[in-house]
Image: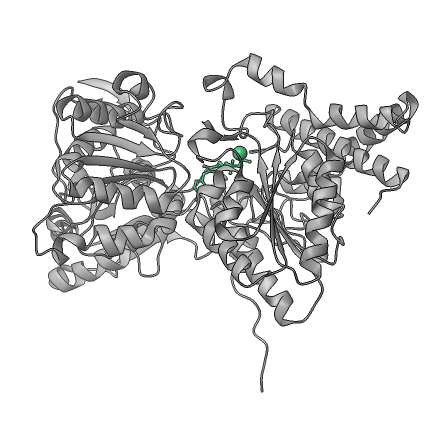
Amino acid sequence: MTLSDETRLEMYWMMLLSRRLDERAWVLHRQGKIAFHISGIGQEAAQVGAAYALRRGYDWVAPYYRDLALMLCLGYEPREFMLSLMGKREEPSSGGRQMPSHWSLRRANVVSHSAVVATQCSHATGIGLAIKMRREDKVVLASLGEGSTSQGEWYEAVNWAAVHQLPVIFLVENNQYAISVPVEKQMAVPSAADRACGLGLRGVAVDGSDVFAVHQAFTEAVELARSGKGPTLIEAKMYRITPHSSDDDDRTYRSREEVEEHKKRDPLLVNRRILERDGLLTASRLEEMESRAKKMVDEAVQYAEQAPYPAAEEAAYPVYAEEVRHD
Amino acid sequence: MARITMREAISQALWEEMERDPRVFILGEEVGVWGGTYAVTKGFYDHFGPERVRDTPIAEAAIIGAAIGAALTGLRPVAELMTINFAFSAMDHIVNQAAKLHYMFGGQMILPLVIRAVGGGGRQLGATHSQTPDAIFAHFPGLKVVAPGTPADAKGMLKAAIRSQDPVLFIEHATLYQTRGEVPEGDYIVPLGKSTIQREGRHVTIVTYSKMLEISTKAADQLAKEGIEAEIVDLRSLRPLDMGPVLESFKKTNRAVIVEEGWKSYGVGAEVASRIYEEAFDYVDAPIKRVAQAEVPLPYNRTLEQMALPQVEDVIKAVKEVL
Ligand SMILES: Cc1ncc(C[n+]2csc(CCOP(=O)(O)OP(=O)(O)O)c2C)c(N)n1
Ligand SMILES: [Mg+2]
């Protein structure tokens, strides 16, 4: 699939918007306005590249907590993100019940995940199974961090998808760290994609800072999955530019020099260069995008700050679904 | 005696046991270079080295499974679960293996294993990060389950746990790490399976443990201003459960409130109340009350979360109801 110039610019826009929202979340946390933030900074290209290969709103997605850019591509709105950070009633995932960034969005077939890492992969396998049973041509994307591929559950989910040739694409966002633990302490292979060969599915490693390279890899994987040719595991290599979450200080386990070095491969920078090289992204266009992003972020924050919190009594429900009457 | 935090007390116990016994080693996520998610093992990696302070992959089932394997060879692993919520990913090893191997081996091999796990809510970490599932683990014969509420008990009981011949689940409450208290220096041991009277009083017995000891103490302070003297029994250990001090206190006050952070249904309060009814029925002057978490997954939003967790006012209200 060749991308139109407009689409390529739009993909950059999604990355930029995600970045500016994410940065604002850090500011809100420092101001004491939100309790927690977990960031996707540095991972936007892989997420946008993957999202644009899907039929958004039609295919299923089982994301993980860093997937803000992915969510925005699926139609999640900036104000919805801010509502969720603040635990407001109107927040579309859960009305303030679920943690922020543990996305769900019914209207876009996005399912929420537990704090227990990698569990969404089994759900994706089940969704893939159901797609097959229902004779649909949908696919499902499950994403997770590289550290989470150490979970036994991950192998169970991926193996099953491979054995039953299910339409699942597993995206491993390899940002080099699991909290403080570097990737070498999680796996004895150079890439999570290598883990695929033992399980009998396609494994693809891709530069996660190049949104178009990721998109290409996903387009192929999605086509195969949609046409009944089974799952693919894609590892996108990247770097976690921020601390793990608002709860930790990464200076205790990695040097500033290391972080600075990796910032040279910041996906915003890398893709800006690509688009500039291709004569698509001009200074004025970029300026326009920046001011639009700032306006959207401001508006989102303003809206969310004024939105009501849930009332205390709302804690009591909805623990169970309403029963359907059979009489 | 020094006044130190719960975190320091736990850290001290671990450090001293590792110095004392070369068979003791630590394994878990983030325990090494980073010094633990709650900074309990800070400095251990540099002092004891990567061999004895081992950062594992994110693999809870294997962490507990491997700890069991190592314990069977005679080592004394202290496995850390970043939160008790991740214990469910290792449930088979905890309840089907650790709790049963000694029995199923006819006692031929021991399993001197400690699982340290951080439990409890109140930090806005959402439903799958904030649970207090202590009672579930206490259900299984073969496991010892303890949850200290003071720094001194944390130190003394962790040392006892490490020296125990049996698998011990040692539950630390996420919001108690900064709590300060007097802690004896050096080799201080608090035997497992002993509850204790933390505060004396004549009018009502409050039975509690862990974080709820703090909540109950605050309630007792306020009640005291109204002339109501609450006696507080700290269970400390859920299995084995020592009913001695509970019954002794109840026979004096004839009224009880049981305060736990977990859900009421099938919980610690249910167990303790039944035992009081079974063993001290003639002393009952009022129906026993339980204070516990609302029966919902713990929500993220602060107001909702606090609504669902037991508060000081809930304890005061329950006490007044039994008086
Ligand atoms: C089963 C389980 N164990 C431990 C944790 C605590 N934890 C949360 S995020 C995380 C690191 C995950 O690293 P990775 O998979 O590389 O994703 P990243 O955060 O780097 O994007 C850990 C250990 C958890 N949430 N679930
Ligand atoms: Mg990672």
Of A186 and B287, the residue lying toward us: A186
Q: Is residue B215 above or below residue B290?
A: above
Its colouring scheme is: one colour
Q: In this view, does A308 lie above or below B52?
A: below
Q: Is residue B321 visible?
A: no
Residue A58: x and y in percent read 74, 58
Q: In this view, does B202 lie above or below B13?
A: below
Residue farthest to the bottom, as pictured: A327
Q: Can residue B23 be seen in this view?
A: yes
Residue drawn at the location 65% of the way across and 20% of the way down? A263
Of A244 and B134, the residue lying toward us: A244
Q: Would residue A87 be found to the left or right of residue A213 on screen? A: left
Q: Which quadrant of the structure image shows residue A261?
A: top right
Q: In this view, does B91 lie above or below A47?
A: below
Which quarter of the rendering shows the C terminus of chain A? Answer: bottom right
Of B293 and A105, the residue lying toward us: A105
Q: Which quadrant of the structure image shows residue A81?
A: top right
Residue A99: x and y in percent read 56, 43
Residue farthest to the top, as pictured: A257
How many marks the image carries: the answer is 0
Residue drawn at the location 13% of the way across and 38% of the way down? B74
Residue drawn at the location 31% of the way across and 61% of the way down? B266
Q: Would residue B50 be found to the left or right of residue A180 on screen? A: left
Residue A141: x and y in percent read 64, 51
Residue A26: x and y in percent read 63, 27
Q: Which quadrant of the structure image shows residue A70?
A: top right
